[in-house]
């Protein structure tokens, strides 16, 4: 059915398409090309092949360190956030008094921006560490767990809301049947609730994975990579490569391409793995 | 009649304790914003007392250092305008490309979806250079750029909903003499309203808090709230902790107010926005 004639294209699609092209499509394609060039601005590019990619990994250890730190951070954050969020969702779907108030409180940190979150947690963590004569930048371990705590505080509420929606979608008839058949709560959880909320698990994992990998504001505000770039995540490392010193723009762009491929592969792999476990109900 | 179980009471007590843990960071920042700047870093968990209480001095200093009122204005202006523009244009686009499945439109749809997983750093440098070149480095240009960046998620969510609207309603409108524009505004958009609220809320939460994009595009001339807060850290050798605390509180107040008044829509919107994925 094609009743909307061609002339309406310019009204309905063109504004979005032009903005999308300028903000995303053209910069993306240029970015791919420039990662193989040496350049200062975007107009003075010289093709250099894979040199930027080689320099990204070999010039200093920053990029590899940042990649490794990001993966370690993401691993801890994804587990902590999803486990706690799921448990809270189970607790908040039992009809306990005050459910709405609890949900309101747990979700609230999500609305606060990354920069502000970073400074709030810097105050909290430094306040605790001060008693032992440390600060958050004296050891990379503090920054690591600080980031995990911060992201958990920020994202648990969001994922909890998604899990609650998933659990509430389970037909009560199935849960009743399980109860009548004498299933233990643990058995119900394993055989009914978890398989039924697989779509929620898929989306929550997807959101936590991509958010954890892309984290920037929180990283910048909490530690800015200190001490000695040890708590620098990939997004911040790329930013510093671009704007930190002249002559490294190509290297920054090459790092960005590697980063993009990494995020895309991990996200797609996860979608594929969890989608295949979703059941039709 | 449901009987209260012991396990429910235990869970209730646990949730009360956890709520308190969740609120500690915010309470701490609020309390410290009223302490003099020298007694913040070392004893943040002590409430202000007669020697450390400094009244609203931190707020006065913070506002003077960061130009908070103007940052608030720009944040509000950019967020409201961008969200309005995004909802308007992406709903039209999503409807049009879902109903006209040409090869171009299908490709465009997949490009929108694709753009959602690309990290900002991938386009950061080239995009800010292009924005500079096209003179988009002002608040109005920024709104246009937000339309481009917001298009991915917004078109995706709108399209998911358009697919579930029966096409016969639109056909009836066309037969009754509506043109395409009228059909969209009088028949389709009213049905899209709940989705429009979802899209508006997700984009508001993102744009209001966004730091890097506005910093790169307009940061040197126009500060939004996140830029103003970060500026407090970057602009001086040592940070005025008092001013910092006051600015954190001033940044949180509008967000929490928005949250508490629109909570129902926000939580529904967040859940609805994800289910479509």
Image: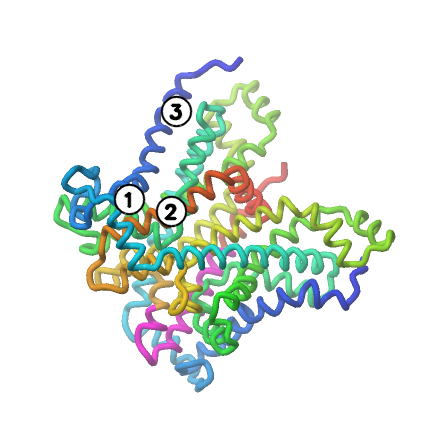
Residue B150 visible (yes or no): yes
Mark 1: few/some/many CA within 10 Å (<14, 14-19, 20+): many
Residue A276 visible (yes or no): no
Residues at marks 2 and 1, CA–CA distance in whole angstroms: 10 Å
Observer-nearest residue: A146 or A206? A146
Discs 2/3, front: 2
Q: Report the disc number at residue B29.
A: 1
Observer-nearest residue: B101 or B207? B207
Query: Residue A246 magenta-drawn?
Result: yes
Vertical placement of residue B106 versus A132, above or below: below
Q: What residue does disc 3 label?
A: B12
Write the residue at 43% across / 57% down: B210
Callout 3: helix, strand or loop?
helix
Both on one chain, marks 3 and 1? yes
Vertical placement of residue A227 versus A123, above or below: below
Q: Which label's residue is closer to the chain start, 2 or 3?
A: 3
Residues at marks 2 and 3, CA–CA distance in whole angstroms: 28 Å
Discs 3/1, front: 1
The subunit letter for the residue under badge 1 reads B
Q: Which label's residue is closer to the chain start, 3 or 1?
A: 3
Observer-nearest residue: A226 or A205? A226
Q: Which label's residue is closer to the chain start, 2 or 1?
A: 1
Quadrant of the image occupied by residue B153: bottom right
Image coordinates for residue B113, horizontal then vertical, percent? 58, 59
Q: Tell me the magenta residue range.
A: A240-268
Q: What residue does disc 2 label?
A: B252
Query: Residue A89 magenta-drawn?
Result: no
The reply to whether discs 2 and 1 touch (Cβ–Cβ < 8 Å) is yes
Quadrant of the image occupied by residue A242: bottom left
Both on one chain, marks 2 and 3? yes
Image coordinates for residue B59, horizontal then vertical, percent? 29, 50
Both on one chain, marks 2 and 1? yes
């Amino acid at each position: 059915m094609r009743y909307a004639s061609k002339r309406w294209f310019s009204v309905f699609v063109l504004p979005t398409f032009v903005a999308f092209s300028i903000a995303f499509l053209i910069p993306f394609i240029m970015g791919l090309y420039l990662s193989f060039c040496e350049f200062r601005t975007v107009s003075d590019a010289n093709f250099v092949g894979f040199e930027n990619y080689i320099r990204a990994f070999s010039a200093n250890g920053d990029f590899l360190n940042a990649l490794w730190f990001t993966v370690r951070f993401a691993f801890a954050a994804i587990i902590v956030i999803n486990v706690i969020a799921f448990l809270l969702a189970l607790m908040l779907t039992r009809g306990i008094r005050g459910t709405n108030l609890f949900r309101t409180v747990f979700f609230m940190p999500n609305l606060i921006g990354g920069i502000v979150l970073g400074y709030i947690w810097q105050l909290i963590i430094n306040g605790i560490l001060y008693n032992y004569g440390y600060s958050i930048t004296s050891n990379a371990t503090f920054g690591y767990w600080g980031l995990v705590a911060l992201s958990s505080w920020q994202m648990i509420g969001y994922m909890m809301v998604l899990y609650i929606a998933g659990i509430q979608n389970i037909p009560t008839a199935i849960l009743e049947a399980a109860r009548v058949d004498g299933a233990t709560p643990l058995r119900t959880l394993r055989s009914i609730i978890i398989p039924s909320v697989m779509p929620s698990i898929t989306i929550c994992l997807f959101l936590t994975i991509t958010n954890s990998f892309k984290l920037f504001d929180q990283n910048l505000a909490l530690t800015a990579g200190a001490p000695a770039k040890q708590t620098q995540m990939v997004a911040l490392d790329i930013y510093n490569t671009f704007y930190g010193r002249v002559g490294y723009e190509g290297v920054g762009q090459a790092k960005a391409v590697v980063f993009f491929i990494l995020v895309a592969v991990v996200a797609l792999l996860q979608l594929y793995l969890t989608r295949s476990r979703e059941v039709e109900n | 009649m449901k009987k209260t179980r012991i396990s429910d009471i235990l869970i209730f007590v646990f949730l009360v304790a956890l709520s308190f843990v969740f609120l500690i960071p915010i309470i701490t920042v609020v309390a410290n914003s009223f302490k003099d700047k020298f007694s913040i870093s070392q004893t943040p968990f002590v409430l202000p007392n007669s020697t450390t209480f400094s009244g609203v001095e931190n707020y006065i200093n913070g506002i003077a250092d960061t130009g908070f009122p103007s940052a608030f204005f720009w944040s509000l202006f950019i967020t409201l305008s961008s969200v309005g523009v995004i909802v308007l244009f992406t709903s039209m686009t999503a409807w049009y490309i879902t109903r006209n499945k040409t090869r171009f439109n299908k490709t465009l749809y997949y490009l929108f979806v694709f753009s959602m997983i690309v990290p900002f750093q991938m386009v950061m440098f080239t995009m800010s250079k292009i924005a500079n070149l096209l003179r988009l480095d002002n608040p109005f240009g920024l709104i246009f750029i937000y339309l481009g960046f917001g298009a991915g998620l917004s078109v995706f969510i709108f399209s998911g909903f358009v697919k579930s609207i029966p096409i016969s309603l639109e056909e009836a409108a066309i037969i009754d003499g509506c043109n395409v524009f009228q059909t969209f505004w009088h028949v389709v958009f009213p049905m899209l309203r709940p989705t429009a609220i979802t899209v508006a809320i997700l984009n508001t939460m993102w744009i209001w808090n966004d730091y890097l994009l506005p910093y790169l595009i307009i940061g040197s001339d126009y500060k939004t709230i996140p830029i103003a807060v970060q500026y407090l850290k970057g602009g001086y050798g040592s940070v005025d902790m008092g001013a910092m605390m006051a600015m954190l509180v001033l940044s949180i107040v509008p967000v929490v107010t928005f949250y508490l008044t629109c909570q129902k829509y926000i939580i529904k919107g967040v859940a609805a926005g994800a289910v479509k994925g």
